[in-house]
Image: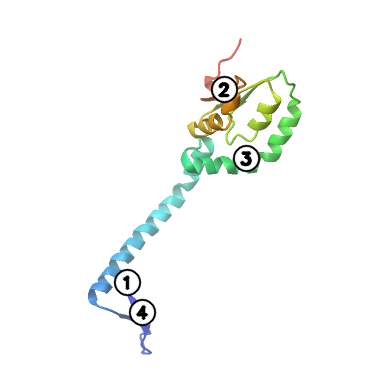
Amino acid sequence: MLRLENKHDQDGLQPVGAPSEICATKRELGHNEACRGFAIRFLLMAPRFIARQLSCPTGLLGRFIGVLMNRHNVKMNGFALKLLDLDPADRVLEIGFGGGLNLPFLVRHAAFVAGVDRSVTVVRSAKTRFAEAIAGGRALFREGSVETVPKRN
């Protein structure tokens, strides 16, 4: 690493160290330029990447996105659950359950809850979280989209 000292001359800060240290610093600066280029490319593609994560969360970042979706949608989801006015005999299909904010309420208040989501990550999380309800035949979670849900005529 290059160390700079103030020599109190007209040039201000001067490098101190062997030529090999100065060359190493130039290589590091080249690396920093590459990192800066990566950061710019990432920022340009970040909106697309985030949109994909919002649409179909995956991996660790997908779990974080799920938490953010839950926080952002808490009031709207609470309003929707109140309007449902669930009866204990009701069967509920939750399409696109995302972070699963509504699922605990639905599992507690409905006879059966089925959930469909495009994200393997959130489906896996729901299966783990509600394993007891699944084992009791009161819940079922599958990967899929609204287009794959069977429809009655």
Name which residue type carries label 1. Answer: Met
Eyeballing the image, is 65 above or below 41? above
Residue to which mark 3 is pinned: 70
Is 130 or 72 nearer to us in this picture?
A: 130
- Classify mark 1: helix, strand or loop: loop
Name which residue type carries label 3. Answer: Asn
Eyeballing the image, is 83 above or below 13? above
* Disc number for residue 4: 4
Residue to which mark 2 is pinned: 135
Name which residue type carries label 4. Answer: Leu
State if disc 1 and disc 2 touch (CB < 8 Å): no
Residue displayed at 68% across by 35% down: 77
Residue displayed at 61% across by 25% down: 133
Q: CA distance from mark 1 to mark 4?
A: 10 Å
Q: Earlier in the sequence, mark 2 or mark 1?
A: 1
State if disc 3 and disc 4 touch (CB < 8 Å): no
- Classify mark 3: helix, strand or loop: helix
Eyeballing the image, is 39 above or below 29? above
